[in-house]
Image (tube, rainbow, N blue to C red):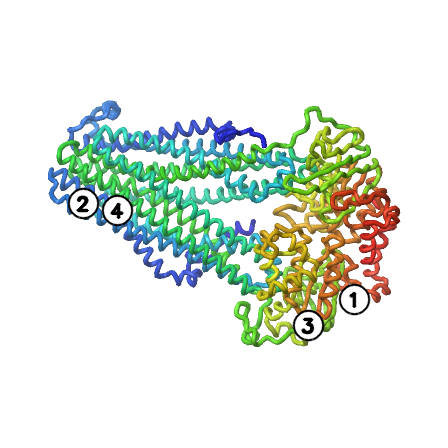
Amino acid sequence: MKKENSNLEGTNLKFFGIPKLFPYIRPYLLKIVIMVSLGVLSSLLDSFIPIFNRYAIDNFIAKGTLKGLPIFTILYVGVLIVLVVDNYICTYICGQVEMGMDRDLRNAAFNHLQELSFAYFNQNNVGYIHARVMSDTGKIGLMVSWRMMDIVWNGSFILCVLLMMLIQNVRLALIVMAIVPIAVIIATYFQKKLIAINRKVREINSTITGNFNEGITGAKAIKTLVVEDKIQTDFEKDTKKMFRTSVHATHYSAFFTASITMLSSIALALVLYKGGVMTMEGVMGIGTLSVFLSYALALMEPVQNVIVTLSELITVQVNVERFFKLIEEQSDVFDRPEVIEKYGDTFNPKKENWEELIGDIEFEDVSFHYPDGDEYVLEDFNLKVPQGTNVAIVGETGAGKSTLVNLVCRFFKPTKGYVLIDGKDAAARSQLWLHSNIGYVLQTPHLFSGSVRDNLKYGKPDATDEEIWKALDLVAASDVVRKMDKGLDADVGEDGDMLSTGEKQLLSFARAILADPKILILDEATSSIDVVTEKKIQDAIGIVTKGRTSFVIAHRLSTIVDADIILVVQDGKIIERGKHSELMKQKGYYYELFTRQFEERSFNLI
Amino acid sequence: MNNKFKTKSQMVLYFLKGSVIFFVISMMYSVLVTFFELVSPKFVQYTVDYCIVDAADSSVPGYIDYVINMLGGRDYLRDNLYLMAVVVGVCAVATALFRYLFKLFNSIAAEKFIRRMRDTLFEHIIRLPFAWHSENHTGDIIQRCTSDVDTIKNFISEQMINLFRISVRIAVAMYFMLGISKFLTFFSAIFIPIIVLYSCFFHRRISTGFEKADSEEGRLSATAQENLTGVRVVRAFGREAYEKERFETQNYHYTNLWIDLIRTLSAFWASNDLISGLQVMLVTIIGAVLCVNNSITVGEYIAFVSLNAMLTWPVRALGRIISEMSKAGVSIDRLRYIMNSEEEKDIADAVEPPMNRDIVFENVSYKYGNGTEDVLRDVSFRIKAGTTFGVLGGTGSGKSTLMYLMDKLYDLPEGAGRIMVGDTDIRDIKRSYLRQNIGLVLQEPFLFSGTLSENIAITQSDVNLKEVRDAAKIADLDEAIRNFNKGYETYVGERGVTLSGGQKQRTAIAQMLMGKPPVMIFDDSLSAVDTRTDARIRKALSETTLGSTVILISHRITTLMHADTILVLDKGRVAEIGSHDELVANNGIYKRIYDIQKQGI
């Protein structure tokens, strides 16, 4: 949060970042040119309408004749229609530019994210990244379209008025123009204050929303702990703060608008006095005086609008900067040009050049530390995992069991050394080639909104229903689907909300199996399924890991006694490795972990 | 559902308590603003007509005549024209001052109003029964408490006030216009209902378009969100290209919806421009004709044209306001749904009996509000005071429901059996007292935003760091906490550090221990902790919970097997009850599950 704020002051983008945005603006350049010209035309026509009124006074009323009224009417209607059509086209094009740019920027951000490595996702939380894709892009689009039009409309109006005034009477024009800088100073001052205070209001507002969220999602905890009154007191502190800050903000904004209105009226009073004297002296005509009176009143509001819009442009710079920070983020895991040449990139794979993955994996002198840390978690690590080997990784919560898996999947690249897949450096083939051969089941299972079928087919888009049911049967998940009212067509809800965690795990298991991966990764997949189901899954694991290279990260040691190699992790480092029986004989850390499960009995339990 | 607020206005009036006076004051100021706004051009006009140009063909209104005479008469003013400029300036200052006051009081009123709404809603929501919370979607309720609340605030503080201001403005302008020419006023006024009805109709029609675009945006946003939270799945299955296509398709769809919407809006704005333009034109031409026919004077003509111009924008805004007001009605009803839901209540003479007594379930049956099947069927058992009692059951066996009933998170209906603490039916026990004395550690604990020490000591009136640390030590959390940079002052919760599932569970245990309750329930509360830590915690706990009644709920036999008595629940019925050895000898479900679990080892 603090970092974002400091960015606001210290942006070093030139011209509001527009030059940098140019590649995204280019497709809409023609539209923008048309839009701006139509906008200028619209301002000109707008300032032309009062002329009709003066013409009516001078030619009909003053002369007491209605001669020429039909032509006058036709002209009037003609100008009106041109103005209306102009406005229609102008706003429509403006909307097209806004939405088009929004769309292009969003696509660019989203697609870039698909190629960024896990280091980026580890260092930035989902909410932050999501805001880059959804909200920054929208603000930029708004700036290039409507904000720009605001400046065009108001700016050209101000110029028109100043020009007209100068043409008609230089002295009086200069008097009115003397007020403009004052308006600029006042507007700039208040706008700066308002931006800061409004940010504070938004912050408190999101705290209050957070409070509501807490009061609702935490209802069970609040009740069982009997802390209703305490929570309520805390909540009222925030709403009180909100009240004060909002009213404080109104002080500024009300003072701001009031002072601009007052300036307009002062301009009016000055024109009335100076212009009135000039008229009485016969230096100036009465018609000119009345025109000046209306100009004086009409001038200050556009000035205010331009200032407000400009200050909004300044705040959008932050969005532009954040957007480019994402777009320019380099992935630290990427395919080399010659690899892309042969295997294709993420979005255009050349599957015809893909060789079949067998499943031999070898770690060769691998050293590794995470990009956001500098402590090595692996040093000169060597391990051969021939095709079909079942590797188990055990250790306490937070010991760093996922590291090896992250390297096998090329989610991270080794700091030193190589991970060899079928005897070749993993980096010698494309990421997509590797990933297409991996099945992955997560500790916190992730389903996409959509039907059960869509989710299961995620790893194998052309799977038939028969294959799906087969996979479901294999992991004892067919009952879960059968009991849903629409079977495979049933909706799983956002993030699988309609299912229990255990059911989600079973389904994500089936999804992985269905893809028939050469390498299977199970990430603590069996930790929260009830015992009977867990047993079923264990049997299924036995079946599906047979003949496949697999990595199982497990809490329950019972899951992995049959593994070909067990790696024991402590504080991020692998301290023991071997088969279950070997490790038990060693009587080391693994033995200790394992025997705890028996020792539990002897504990004088709660 | 009670009917505390029978009508919409009843509830709005309730929320308006305390702020209505400020609204009234702000409305008074708004009338003053309108008055000065309309009077100031009058002074300009008469200055031009009577001082600068010598046109004496119309009468001067009384108040202007009064001001002119007060300042020394027309001839004096002609020589000292600055005096009229001062009058206009004074009007300007008055307008600015009253506008400032109007906005300020309006904001005070609006903020007081919204604050009362939020406070009342929050207070009400946290006191609604848990059943209500599980029946209603969190997102929906939050939406009601945020955007619906904003809608209602805008309805009162902007739409209602603007409606009032515009009505005053139109009425005053019409009054002056009628004074000039009834005939001309007719042509001007006839456009008002047309514009209002047209924009009303249009805004109503376009609102479905907005809703569609909104929900499409929600869908697009959810797709991005899912892609980000599921990044591992996307990558591991190599489905980036599919994700790209999915997002781009939705993005195009969303964009096109908006472009269509903007086209409709542009057409509306343009046609509205046309109607207003035609009105101005009609007034200009007919006015000119009337003037030529000597029905009105030149001064009257000019005054009429400028009065007419002042109506254009307010009239347009009127249509939008009226059409948007219908939205507020929906929002009010959505809040009324919350406010009319019944809070948890104790019976009139609720008691506070000692809690270190036997707990007895007698023929308890229960079914959830929206369910068809009984979750618990005729369940009876006794938990002896001071013993450890285990409840074993699979997913959906009803084991958690047992505890929710005991803590009165759900109320056991009359005739569905009873739960006794000593000789007292828990229906007669004061809710807060009961819950304070039953320490319930949930399987998925909830952390409040705040520091770790605040969380652990949340039930205490003040934070005693030593006690907090002692509790954390028992829960095997002290070391982990001290490894955090800020230790016990580490900020957790929604916007703080994310704790692992195991750390959360241990925090909840420490939190419960702070209250030293005579009855402790652990609802699968160590499921996310690895076995070694699990064992360590249980050892430490067994030393501190001596004398308390402890209830353990789990599907893991190793967790329960040392309990004094174990209840086996199967599909809501008591399948078996007894000590571990008895149950193993019994050769029933317990033995079967025990074998499966043991076989794993």
Q: How far, Cα to Cα, is label 1 from label 2?
A: 96 Å
Q: Which residue is mark 4?
A: A47
Q: Earlier in the sequence, mark 3 or mark 2?
A: 2
Name the amino acid, label 4.
Ser
State the residue at coordinates (61%, 76%): A355
The verdict on a common chain for dots 3 and 2 is yes
Chain name for mark 3 = A
Q: Find the distance from the CA under tag 1 to the CA under tag 4.
A: 85 Å
Q: Which residue is mark 3?
A: A359
Which of the labelled discs sits on residue B470, or is there none? none
**Given this view, does label 4 or label 3 mark the residue nearer the observer?**
3
Quote the CA–CA distance across marks 4 and 3: 76 Å
Comparing A533 with B27, the one in front is: A533
Pointers 4 and 3 in contact (C-beta within 8 Å): no
Left or right of residue A30: residue B183? left
User: Mark 3 is on which residue type?
Assistant: Gly
Q: Chain of mark 1?
A: A
**Pick the front one: A462 or B191:** A462
In the rendered image, residue B392, in percent from the top left (x then y), is placed at: 78, 46
Mark 4 or mark 3: name the one nearer the start of the chain: 4
Residue labelled with disc 1: A577
| In this rendering, the label closer to the viewer, 1 or 2 | 2
